[in-house]
Image (cartoon, rainbow, N blue to C red):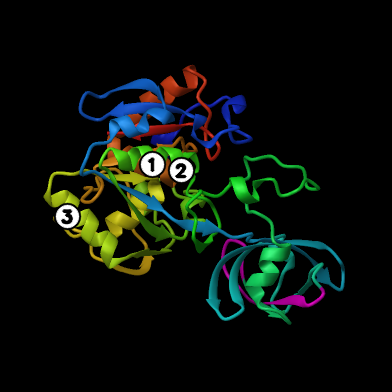
Amino acid sequence: MQLSDFDYELPEELVAQHPPAERDASRMLLVDRRTRDWQDSAFASLPGHLRARDVLVLNNTRVFPARLVGRRVPTGGTVELLLLREIESNVWSTLTRPARRLKNGAQIKFDEPQLQARVIESLDDGVRLVRFESARPLDQVIDQIGQTPLPPYLKRAKDSSDEDRERYQTIYARERGAIAAPTAGLHFTSRILREIEARGVRVAQITLHVGYGTFEPVRGADLSRHHVAPEWFSITDEVAQLINQARATGGRIVAAGTTTTRALESASSSDGLITPGSGFTDLTIVPGYEFRAVDALFTNFHLPRSSLLILVSAFAGRALILAAYRHAVTKGYRFYSYGDCMLIL
């Protein structure tokens, strides 16, 4: 398949710029893979579509303020660093801007006088290895001066306060390490989770630290050559046992989000059993992939030509998903991170 097969038209005004006043107030498109149809609904109705013995799996990764703004030494030019992954103590793989001006040895200073950085290696696509030197623990400094790394389609004034630091985070976020939110989880509230559990549905948490690979543009036209960058995930013994027991007793595994889906599928055997453990997954899901662990998928609406839209299309079928997206556009659904959602059964 070609990347152009996963395009669709979206009016700019349907890109949600801010979250709804209440997390659980979003609309939800209910998509049925068996009947190849859909119906308009609301996220508040989600508990009613789940059954006793089902397991709802959430990604409990926590977004950290991974965007740092500094100045080059000695010119004073502005530099932006997006922290991608810590390679070793105080050495980070970073996406830099402007990359062409940050050669090996370039020095960077920050508003925090006890923090400075130096470029130690130049990689492809604007990625630099940067060594930080800090008089205090680096995580503390990053939490103090860093900014929430929002997607580029969320427009914010440069001098605005970090209004998204709490809202661009799930209520169950616990494990620090993501540079983007698992946005399907942004809809959940304590009330909704209580309603789900009251129906006999078990709620489990795994971790996948959402990295640049999740939203990196698909660069090649031929999907057979497409590879999503590795991301770190972890599934505990307890969660693996819970999921495997549910499958053995006829329960469905409902993944909240594409990142949860990637982690579960990465840990599954050919018969759908989950193996506990942690590490990096480089699993790339495209049409033709045989899903083994996930029976239903709860997700947001994704960017055209993105790896996430491709994954969702692999799960439900490209024609059905694109038709459902066209319906959502016609009905004025809100799209992307702070937008509405869909449940694919």
Q: Is residue 123 magenta?
A: yes
Residue found at the very far right of the displayed protein: 75
Mark 1 belongs to which amino acid? Answer: Arg
Mark 1 element type: helix
Residue toward you, 179 or 7: 179
| Residues drawn in magenta | 113-128
State left or right for residue 236 relative to residue 111: left
Whether residue 68 is visible, yes or no, is: yes
Foreground: disc 3 or disc 2: 2
State left or right for residue 125 relative to residue 342: right
Q: Residues within 10 Å of mark 3 (few under 14, many from 20)?
A: some
Predominant SS along the magenta part: strand
The residue identified by callout 3 is 245
Quadrant location of the N terminus in the rendered image: top left
Q: What's the distance in space between the residues labelled 2 and 1, CA to CA? A: 6 Å
Instruction: Please determine whether, in this image, residue 142 is positioned above or below residue 286.
Output: below
Pointers 2 and 1 in contact (CB under 8 A)? yes
The residue identified by callout 2 is 190
Please report whichever mark, 3 or 2, sits nearer to the chain's N-terminal start: 2
Mark 2 element type: helix
Where residue 59 appears, x then y in whole percent? 41, 53
Rendered residue at 34%/27% (across/down): 30
Instruction: Please determine whether, in this image, residue 34 is positioned above or below residue 142.
Output: above
Mark 3 element type: helix
Foreground: disc 3 or disc 1: 1
The residue identified by callout 1 is 194
Residue toward you, 63 or 109: 63
